[in-house]
Image (cartoon, coloured by chain):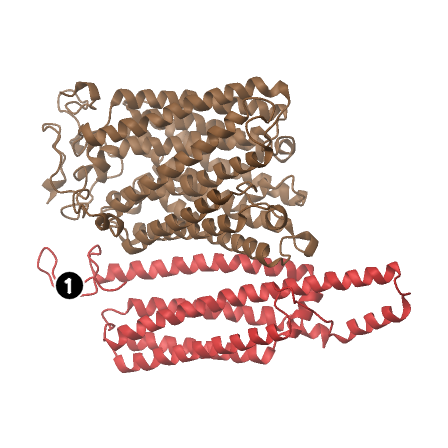
Amino acid sequence: MAAHIEVHDAHGHIHHPALQHHFDNMEQQKEAVSIGMWFFLVQEIMFFGGMFLVYLLFRSKFPMAFAVGSNHLNMWLGLLNTIVLIVSSLTMAMAVWSAQTSKRNLQIIFIIATMFLGSVFLGVKAYEYYDKYESNLIPFSNTFRWEPEGEHLIEERKMIDEHAAPNSVEREMVANNYYQFGNKVRIFFWIYFAMTGLHALHMIIGLGIMLWLLYGAIRNRFSSEYYAPVEISGLYWHFVDIVWIFLFPLLYLLGRHFLE
Amino acid sequence: MQENLVINNTQNLPVYPKLNYLNNGHTVSSWLLTKDHKRIAILYLLSVSVFFMLGGIYAGLIRLELLTPKGDLVESGTYNKLFTHHGILMIFFFLIPSIPAVLGNFLIPIMIGAKDLAFPRINLLSWYLYIAGASFTLWALIQGGVDTGWTFYTPYSTTFSNTYVIATGLGIFINGFSSILTGLNFIVTIHTMRAPGMTWFRLPLFVWAHYATSLVMVLGTPVLAITLLLLVVERVGRVGIFDPALGGDPILFQHLFWFYSHPAVYIMVLPGMGVVSELIANFSRKRIFGYTFIAFSSIAIAVFGFLVWGHHMFASGQSPYAGLVFSFLSMVVAVPSAIKVFNWTATLYKGSISYDTPMLYGLFFIGLFLIGGLTGLFLGAMGLDVHLTDTYFVVAHFHYVMVGGAVLAYLGGLHYWWPKMFGRMYSEFWSKLSAMIIFIGFNLTFFPQFILGYMGMPRRYHAYPEEFQVFNIFSTAGASVLAVGLFLPLFYLTYSLIRGKAAGDNPWLLPGLEWRTTSPPPTENFIETPIVTWEAYEFGEESGLYDEETHHKSEVKPVSLFDQN
């Protein structure tokens, strides 16, 4: 969306330097880019929608395994990230407002603040991923190892260990069940990594867009006459935010209490 | 300004404009870095033609193998790869981009009176994504290919196949974004770039059809993208989303896959219906019957198309109650398709029909789509489908829709707008001959397959019992005829670029906006932004399209190779 500099049209009218040659006027250009962004976000909903369907299906199939998986996630870090993102949406909205009211310096400050909060989010996320790696909870690795933690599961296992004869069919079945249960927890972690990973990828792209906005803001490109790029980037940022608002309860919170 | 728009070439001989989008820059980079939607359309035209030919070669090999009951030409494993490659190339790299990315790209801005699509750079990007995805897939095919069928059913594709599933999947994944971006561009363009006076209900039905198609592209393709991503990661990481041995659900894959791939059928055929609406109305020289019904039936097909995917899964273990609902909804989606067919037929009634080559394709489409659509109802009826699932009946059905429908519409559209795209007229004789050959060859190839399927011949096997041979011989013979018919345009269309006569701005004498600019159009499409004061398909006395005395199009006759000096 970089400006194609064309100051005069065939009639010698003065045009805004950001007006691209195939649009008649700035209003048409702004309408086009915002409709474009809205439809792009619809596309994004369908993209994430596939993952949400997968989540829904497996959650209803294996509620226990999902509860166990949720208990391995750090709820407080998730909460921190949720707050960080909500605040970043506020700073983003302020950046859009500063562009609309032609306040260059405020714009720069708010874009930097948004970038800072986005980076904090990604930092916390990276720490969480590292923590999962340390605890051998990376689902597509051969070292994935899940140990039952909930007390009643431990109880159950103890009971079986005490009562079933060694090498009995029953014991084998139980071992098999644990293996299968482990696979179900693994599915939870795969969904966790796929959904948060996809979300993090969108955050990284968002930070790239912010960098581009920052460059434009420093060069004073955006004003009350031309702020569509800031506005549609804001739409994108809020969308990525909203995805997280859904991810946090679904992955971190739902079903935790089963085991507490 | 109005004078610029009035068509006055009934008196003048056709001329070739000095300045047009084709001679605006001759360097390689003026093509590869172009933002002109018309040049991007030409890039697509060249690339989809290559993939059509490749897919055709695979089809030829399949038919050759099936000539005899024994598997004597290729082994079963190779045969699996042949039909997989045929399906993947034809569906993802030819049928889906063909009409939208070539004809839609070229014509939508011109038809609505815009200078370009809303996002020219994104348009170019989508061509590069197409090329990247296609190269990825081609690389995988050259390395050894895939044998899962174009449907990639799990757990075979995730666990058991030893072929290049990952690379192919990623190729299709990348290509999907090309499709999404094209759809996005069309939607925004149609919403915001219409010329003054070009209201929604003055849009040509071609544009309406593309609007509906774009909705499907934007809503459906991301689901395929995420599905393929899940497939690839499962294959790499052995996590059990789809693998039942690890707790996963193989039917989930089928649901996700068909959630895109059934609407994808409408991505392929809706633009074709748009082309045919143009052909039928314009070559009957009559306002199309039931304009609003056809326009909204496109939207209805796009919407209902999303609710019928389960009819691909009647025999998969899906709940019979779900099957019942999907079966019912599949009957419902037939209604808007039938509305179109009835309206086209009603348009022909008392029309002043001329049998130019594009119109031949238009008429073929109606007949073949009718057969394809009605046999689709057989398959949508759950009880009958249990008998016909995975037989040649299914193969024949979707080829009647995809080839008899989408490909013939593409060829019809290409012949119809060829003089606009290149300013040259092709040989009337050869083009009509090739259209007839294609029609005969197509029916000879695929009609016997209905009978084979009904007799119980399963699809995707390289050997079959001897009693099926006679129909397979018919089918293979038909495929050879079809191949001849499809090769002819390659020659006479190319020849027309070198030696064809100048077509003139409006060779068919039609009122559409695309016929009111030069052929080929200038880079900006129109010298001045047109102001639209007429309805779509307005063939009145006042349109100035008729010779005053004969009330018949005269003067500009289609030019044959043989009447050149």
Relative depth, front residue between B33 and B338 = B33
Q: Is the residue B56 above or below the residue B303 in the image?
A: above
Along the viewing direction, whichever of B543 and A113 lies nearer the viewer: A113
Percent x, y for residue B208? 35, 43
Please give the name of the residue rendered at 14% of the width and 40% of the height, measured from the top-left corner. B5
* Chain ID of residue with mark 1: A
**Colour for chain A in the figure:** red
The quarter of the displayed image where residue B4 is located:
top left
Mark 1: amino acid: His
Relative depth, front residue between B161 and A115:
B161
On the rendered structure, is A2 left or right of B4? right
**So how many labels did they put on this image?**
1
**Residue A248 in sight:** yes
Task: Give the labeled residue for mark 1.
Answer: A15
Where does the image place residue B121, in percent across and percent down from the top left?
A: 29, 55
Q: Tell me if I can see residue B187 in this picture.
A: no
Chain B, chosen colour in render: brown
Please tell me which residue is depicted at 20% across the width and 44% down the height of the picture.
B532
